[in-house]
Amino acid sequence: MLTVDQSIEAFLDAHKDARLESYKELLRIPSISTLPEHRPDIERAAQWIVDELSRIGIEHARTFDTAGGHPLVYGDWLHAEGSPTILVYCHYDVQPVDPIELWETAPFDPFVKDGRMVGRGSADDKGQLHMHLKAAEAMLATRGTLPVNLKFLFEGEEEHSSVGLEDWLRANAELLAADAIVISDTGFFEGNVPALTTSLRGMMYAQIDVSGPPVDLHSGGFGGAVQNPANALARIITELKSASGSVLVPGFYDDVVPPTKEERFEISCLPFDEGDFHRQTGVPELVAGEPGFSLLECMGVRPTLDVNGIWGGFTGEGSKTIIPAHAHAKVSCRLVPDQDGEKIFEQLRDFVAQVAPRGVKVEVQNLGTAKSLRMDANLPVSKAAAKALEATFGKAPVAIRSGGSIPVAAMFDEVLGLPITMLGFTNPDDNAHAPNETMVLLNYETGLRTITRLWDDLGRMSPLEARMGGTTA
Ligand SMILES: [Zn+2]
């Protein structure tokens, strides 16, 4: 069920092949932000987008350097007098391709198979960025004008911790002045059901380093007399969680906002197929992280603590009898409102010091934190987005509480204080960050019509109305 302006529909129809060709062209640029050897590709992708913005009639298209070293792309069109100004965010950098041997085809040689665009970045997030370009192009080409004022901000280091973004946002808050923000970097619910993401979890990432003797010692000569760092680390990790899955760090749950009855009801109504989800994981059995909470609750509205990696001592083939000099673990927590990452780090650090066995030196490093964020589904822009999704996909979107973290959303919230709508279109089986990434072309094609529809709806809103719900506005 497509209900968009007929002239736009005719334009989109007539340009379908060219559009897919252009999509592929962007995907062919291997803009991997974490690998320095791809720096020229990052520049090339940024320039490709600047050229494309200018070509379709977006003004002031240019790049900005950030402290992180990967250019931001900006462009605007500000002639819809009296209409809201929307800041649109996507990112053009992509994840590395490892493990490359699991790709069925070359990751940067995109092609269409079974109704999907296959290739790194097809979904996360070049596909969604491209949808915004093509939506604006169709409107400008057919009408010569846009119903809203648009400011595009396309990041080049989202997959590289957005290292330079926050400082840049603070320094350029005036340039980014808007009434609302639309972020397209999320996706649909299981079963490819249209969705709007209404919360994101935050993050705390730490490393525990346990050291004992200055060098590995012979376990025959010293075993029994000195503390073993690997054993000590295992003991520390055991103390962090109960057998049933609750985190035992004192204070960890103090600031957690419990889900309301309504929220729990909404979550229980989501069309979640547990069997299908189980199959996707490949594990013998699913375990809810905490007693008293459903799987979806554990993944969306409850915090977690996970060991992400553990190493130390002899790990080669065969046997070598040593007491290792040191052992290490990476530990991360997904956080929910109103947990504070810095505070959680301090609680973890103090608890680790308290439970650490005697005879070893233990250090805990903070590798970074990101804030969690809740977005009100009743904001005017979010409601308009829900309406546009329903009108184009024929199905009202479900509200999902994402277990993931998009630090940029919290940065926008803190620096700009504007209402945020997370409008994402990717299919849940898109393999983002994994081999064989895909975007369902029906989501792409319908989604870009959703965007034009949303701009039309927002064009009928006053700037003040679009702004309602911002934290500082
Ligand atoms: Zn992304």
Image: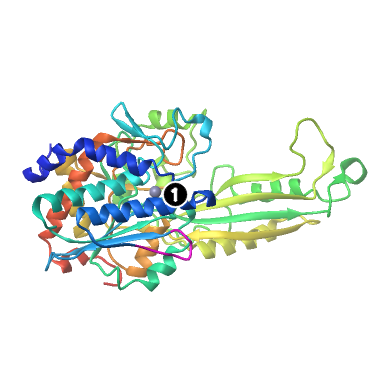
What segment carries the magenta color?
Answer: 63-70
Q: Nearer the viewer, residue 370 or 237?
A: 370
> How many marks can you see?
1
Magenta part mainly helix, strand or loop?
A: loop
> Mark 1 falls on what kind of element?
helix
Q: In the rendered view, does 269 fall on the left or right side of 388? A: right
Magenta stretch: includes residue 67: yes
- Residue at horizontal 59%, vertical 48%? 241
Neighbours of disc 1 within 10 Å: few (<14), some (14-19), many (20+): some
Q: Residue 410's spot in the image, x, y percent? A: 39, 61
Q: Residue at x 22, y 47 (%)?
A: 134
Q: Quadrant of the N terminus?
A: top left
Question: In the rendered view, does 80 fall on the left or right side of 168?
Answer: left
- Res 299 → quadrant: top left
Residue 272, percent across and down?
A: 33, 35
Please state the horizontal and vertical placement of residue 472, each as a whole percent of the image: 30, 72
For the point 52% across and 34% down, the residue is 100
Q: Residue furthest right?
A: 221
- Residue at image location 45% in from the left, 27% down from the top: 104
Choose between 53 and 380: the one closer to the eye. Answer: 53
Label 1: which residue? 41
Image position of 31 with respect to 120: above or below: below
Give whichever of 457, 131 is nearer the camera. Answer: 131
